[in-house]
Amino acid sequence: MTRTSPPAKPMSGSSADAEGRNQGGGGGGTANASPSEIAREALRQLAVKRVPPTPDNYRELYYQISGSIADEAFPVRALKAIASSLPRSTPESLRLAQQFERGVASGQWPALKQAVLALCEGRDSEQRQWSPLIRELTQQLERRHLGITQARKRDALEHVLGTNAAADQLHMRLSALVRSWSQTEDDPAVKLAAPVADKLSAASGVADKDINGKALTALLNKVLTRGIVALAENNQQLANEAQAIAAALGAVSPGHDLAPLIEQVDHLLARAEWEGEERQTIRAALLNLLHLIIDNIRELVIDDSWLHGQLAVISEVFVNPLDIRLLDEVEHRLRDVIQKQGHLKRQLSDAQQRLKSMLAGFIDQLSAFSATTGDYELVLGRSADRIAQAKDISELSDVIDEILRETHNTRESAIRSGEELSSLREQVSSANQHILRLQRELDETSEMVRHDPLTGALNRKGLDEALAREISRMRRLGTSLCLSLLDIDNFKQINDQHGHVVGDDALRHLAGVIRDTLRPQDAVARYGGEEFLILLPETDLDQANAILVRLQRELTRRFFLANEQRLLITFSAGVACLDPDEDPLIAIDRADKAMYTAKRAGKNRVINAL
Ligand SMILES: Nc1nc2c(ncn2[C@@H]2O[C@H](COP(=O)(O)OP(=O)(O)OP(=O)(O)O)[C@@H](O)[C@H]2O)c(=O)[nH]1
């Protein structure tokens, strides 16, 4: 291929630009013709062929005539147009556009090639920058910002996306949006609720945030209507506010700005906190008052050991953290104290009344006796005068008769007084005995009120109270309540071999091990001779079974000593869980049947009831 000079354009203008820039060779077909001859011939053919004399047509004919190949012209103008439309919004895109411009200005294909390659690479790397932006965008969309609702965020995003901006501009605008969100604080209310939302999401297996949002709203509604309203039982205003916020929450539609509601909830919670603190203070003051009253009663009843015992138990309750079961126990004990005090007061006033009337009788007797002896003294004085003045024996015999008669009367009266006084003394002593007997009877009955005197476990009355209390707790709190009936194995044998006293000790031992093994909230009652019933609140059937098995193991560790001989006490047990609406007697019956199944199956085992 021969290199030719660029054909001069027939018209002036851009030909100068083209000159010297064309590279590569062109061969002459008319090898001997000079360029000007070829040019002339090309113009002639344009006219002959009636081809429009455009530069391109001229150039084509020129090369046909010369028989050479046209060097491609460097398309400066077109390239400049491209350069002007290159993006320059980011420093990087500006740098690339300028490099491209320099490539065009150089008129050199290699420089332009470099600029185009850099441009392509820049595009690639810009493409790669979208990934972190999209990741950050989704994160910020999910975050809950203080003062920016989700709806507002969606609107802003919609606005940016809806502008049909070029990719780099879109990138720039989205970056700015995401940056503004990321610089906004998190909403603390949502921070608090987040773990709950996560739990709900995990529990339901649904990651949908809308569903979580609804669940959270429902949850908050419950907190307000049940939690706060219950807490504010003595503060109607607080309760009303909680109800009002709950109602407003129920009316919230998607996209609603929650910020004012969140602020109200914040305020409400602060007031509920004060309410709680005030209650704590009142509770502490009431406890102090109760302490004071108990101390005073204790000082007043110096001689009553029973009352002292009861009061000691009550005082103990306040040493430990308050517990509803213990308070229930205190209430029952206080009732017993009040009842006992009432009895004692009545007895005391009866006894006082009787002693008063006895004393009055005694004084009457004394004065009657002294009146009699006073008369006797008068008679004696008078008789002495008459004896001194008597002139003969016959006069004396009248005096002696009178003395004898008065002496006899006085003696009769003294005997009568003595008898009456000793009868009075007997009455006082019998009244005292009566008071003592009453006192003893009261002591015994009060001890028997709710506990079995042999084992210290609850008796039937105590069991009934504990059952009623636990069933109502179960229904109120929706918890589970299990019970177990256990019966000592071969107890008759223990009695027969070691005697009844050892049998009693064995019962006491078992009751002690049960008490030590169970939790404080569990209750144990003696249900029959060698039968015990255990109440296990907040326990399901498997847990109850495991507790009884643990009790069996504990009994193998803690031997019972019968006359220094180690005896292994075992039991068979049936376990049943109460259905919320079930009659407790039916549940006990089910446990009883399971216990008999355990006996028939070989004893020393625990079986769950059907
Ligand atoms: N020492 C003593 N024995 C009692 C008391 N109450 C019941 N018993 C005795 O407990 C025994 C129960 O005997 P059974 O009903 O035959 O039962 P068992 O020997 O344990 O046999 P299984 O239950 O089949 O293992 C009887 O001998 C009763 O007299 C009590 O308060 N003290």
Image (spheres, grey):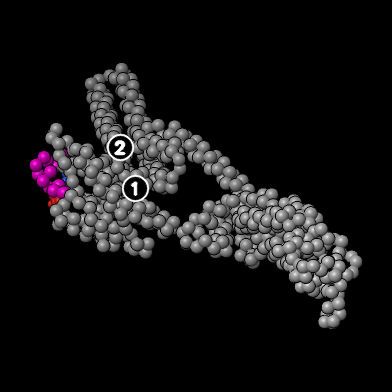
Residue 140 is situated, as x and y percent measured from the top left of the image, at 63, 55
Q: Is mark 1 on a helix, strand or loop?
A: loop
Most prominent secondary structure in the magenta stretch?
A: helix
Whether the magenta-drawn stretch holds residue 272 is answered as no
Q: Residue 216's quadrant in the figure?
A: bottom right
Badge nearest the viewer, 1 or 2: 1
Give me the residue at 18% from left, 55% from top.
598
Q: Which residue is drawn at 30% across and 54% down?
A: 542
Residue receiving disc 2: 436
Image location (x, y in percent) of residue 299: 44, 32
| On-image quarter of the C terminus | bottom left
Residue, far left: 497
Can you name the residue that lies furthest to the front here? 32
Nearer-the-camera pick, 338 or 321: 321
Observer-nearest of 432 and 498: 498
Q: What element carries label 2?
A: helix
On the image, which quarter does residue 607 sit in? bottom left
Q: Which amino acid does label 1 sit on?
A: Asp
Looking at the image, which residue sits at the far top?
388
Pick whichever, 248 or 488, lies toward us.
248
In the image, 385 versus 70, the foreground residue is: 70
CA–CA distance between discs 1 and 2? 38 Å
Q: From the image, tell me which residue sits under label 1.
A: 522
Which segment is the magenta one? 489-502
Residue 400 falls left or right of residue 36: left
Point out residue 149 in the picture as x, y percentages from the top left corner: 67, 59
Q: In which quarter of the image is the N terminus?
A: bottom right
